[in-house]
Image (cartoon, rainbow, N blue to C red):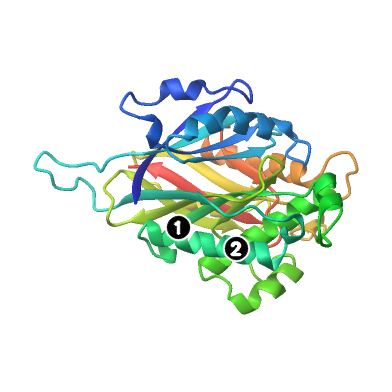
Amino acid sequence: MSGIAIHKFTTAHPGDVSALKSLPESTKPEDLLAVIGKTEGNGCVNDFTRMLSSTVWDPHLEASGGISVFSGGTEGVLSPHVSLVVKEDDYLNEDGSKMYNEGLVAKVGGTRDFEPWEMGTAIQAKVTADTIKKLISEVEVEPDDVHMVLVKCPLLTTAKVVASAKECVTTDTYKSMGYSRLATAVGIALALGEVTEDGIDDALESYGQRGWSSRASCSSGAELENCHIVILASSKKASNPYRAVHGYMADAIDLNVLLELTSKIPRGAKRVQIFVKAEPSTDGVVRGKRHTMMTDSDIQGTRHARAAVGGLVAGVWGETDVYVSGGAEGQGPMGGGSVCVVYKV
């Protein structure tokens, strides 16, 4: 089990690792568990800003066995940034007793690499679920204690499709991002008890409408072949001032849930970070009014949704370096998305 601290820094460019110099002097290389970032690429298949950021950050994670998760796309007011998740010793009183009766803990890990034909299928969901269950057990918490399972999952490229030994879920590389996010989210839902194993196929076939997780945050990229997993949970065994609450937006303009969750932050507490998933509703409407996010041939729908929800979230949070990720298949109700708020008392 790792009690943690989370430190957030804006970045000047995708190769910027200067945040390491701003960490507390007591932080050692082996304490860095995860780097969770937003980069200024298009968030699509050919977003090489994610790959650049992973390439420059991953060497700094070798000592700890940590992982990187980069989500591309900072449309609108969103600011490129990184959130560094680091191990931190328990806060203790002078007599050695715990200063706090609880705290936020984290566990990171990864699945095995997936074959191209496994991506977006029940196989990916089940493998992801098994890995998450193992990580939850190792961090000594229960599924109900988990606030967020944040995952970077793979996608299909043309080369992978051509080389695949079996038929892939799709030959469209952009669509493969959604299928991979969906399968990953269904795996998270299975691990957390939000769907049953018998419901996996139905969840996948309905594109997450009949089986989803309110605590899943999944993004896909060409920079990896497996799933990188970060679990954030509350633990009575930890003693630190970090706390989290979670919920989900029912649609892209669900201001009420953002206000409800942020209202749970106690007076005087410090806002640390908010993690939100966003997607265009596939029925083409928001609260009965037509939207054009799915019919714009110039700009992908996930980019529209990221910009719209990003502006809403930034306005509520009061900062623009918030983590808003596009493509919420199985990560909340259709057209909505999961929300996790982290603060420090």
Q: Earlier in the sequence, mark 1 or mark 2?
A: 2
Q: Which quarter shows the C terminus? A: top left
Q: Is residue 58 left or right of residue 90?
A: right
Residue beneath the point at 55% across and 45% down = 275
8 to 331, vertically: above or below: above
Question: In the image as oriented, which residue stretches furthest toward the right?
Answer: 297
* Residue sitting nearer the eye, 23 or 139: 139
| Residue designated by label 2 | 127
Examine the image and state in which quarter residue 16 appears. Answer: top right
Query: Which disc number belongs to residue 135?
Result: 1
**Amino acid of disc 1:** Leu
* Residue 293 visible in the displayed image: no
Distance CA(mark 1)–CA(mark 2): 13 Å
Question: Residue 112: x, y in percent?
Answer: 59, 54
Q: Secondary structure at mark 1?
A: helix
Question: Residue 40: x, y in percent?
Answer: 69, 30
Question: Residue 56: x, y in percent?
Answer: 58, 27
**Amino acid of disc 2:** Val
Examine the image and state in which quarter residue 190 appears. Answer: bottom right
Residue beneath the point at 58% across and 37% down = 314
